[in-house]
Image (cartoon, rainbow, N blue to C red):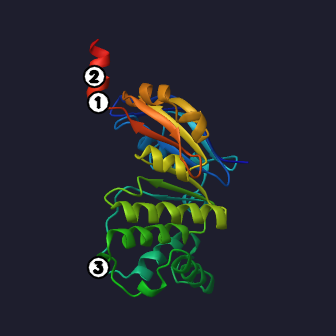
Amino acid sequence: MVAIDAHNLKIAYNRTIIVSDLSITLHGGEITALLGPNGSGKSTVLRTLARLLAPSQGVVYINGRNIAKMPTKQLAQQLAMLPQTSEIPPAITVKELIGYGRYPHQNLLGRLSAKDRAAIEWALTVTGLSSLASRAVDTLSGGERQRAWIAMAIAQQTRVLLLDEPTTFLDIRHQLDVLALVRQLNQEHGITVGWVLHDLNQAAAYSDNLIMISQGKVVASGSPKEVMTTSNIQQVFNVDMTVIPHPINGYPICLPCDYRLATQRKAG
């Protein structure tokens, strides 16, 4: 089952082409990570999939429908996007923030219905934030705050969730906490996820599919074992890596080669 299908995307900023001709698929019920160096176009692609950017060429489908032709509320009922950074309204509580996720389902009066309140409580529960519902968001730790943003996104009760670098600025414990939460949402609630991650090992461990992008083009796409190869990493990131299976779960792990040895080898 395909959740999002993008064909022949061409994306430009001020006449500068960022993505020239790119086609990707996010499979329903799975997690797909977009990987690539800074400036490769991965965040641009994610924003285009969410219709935050309009491609100058190509089309994006969600569940078979052209997103460019969908009313905004209809699209927001099927897809939620969490950008890398978001501004927090002053003095807003966790529960109030999550309530913003119900906007696509509200009537013109904007009042919360019983269904809205149930969705908010569900989002609080599954993200482990029930005890923090009355806390101001700006008093939370970085990890708690990211959980609150994710809770707001899933309160939309969409089937597709897009996340742009959700672990940025978090320490390793809270990074793993967020990654595990997203995997839980995927496995227990069937949410399709597309996310941009920088850590290759985390992407391989928590994603079903990887798409490596370089200079706005797909270099490799497939399962972590298919994509996480020394040749792909060298081509996309221009670094020498050794790839080995994780001793417990078998996921591919990339380890950097000694930089001095690599430099000497190239010089020789």
Depth check: give the residue in front, 110 or 13.
Answer: 13
The answer to which image quadrant residue 257 occupies is top left
Instruction: List the residue tagged with mark 1.
Output: 259
Q: Is residue 266 left or right of residue 227?
A: left
Q: Is residue 159 visible?
A: yes
Q: Whole-percent x and y of residue 251?
A: 56, 46
Residue type pointed to by label 1: Tyr
Q: Residue at x 57, y 52 (%)?
A: 248
Q: Residue at x 59, y 65 (%)?
A: 185
Quadrant in which the C terminus appears: top left
Instruction: List the residue tagged with mark 2.
Output: 263
- List the single residue furthest toward the front: 247
Q: CA distance from mark 3 to mark 1?
A: 42 Å
Secondary structure of the residue carrying numbered label 2: helix
Q: Is residue 138 left or right of residue 11?
A: left
Q: Are marks 1 and 2 in contact (CB under 8 Å)?
A: yes
Q: Mark 3 vs mark 1: give the one in front.
A: 1
Q: Residue at x 27, y 14 (%)?
A: 267
For residue 171, above or below residue 145: above
Q: Residue at x 32, y 18 (%)?
A: 265
Tell me which label, 3 or 1, sits earlier in the chain.
Answer: 3
Q: Are marks 2 and 3 in contact (CB under 8 Å)?
A: no
For residue 92, above or below residue 175: below
Q: Whole-percent x and y of residue 124?
A: 51, 79
Q: Whole-percent x and y of residue 199?
A: 41, 47
Depth check: give the residue in front, 106 or 90.
Answer: 90
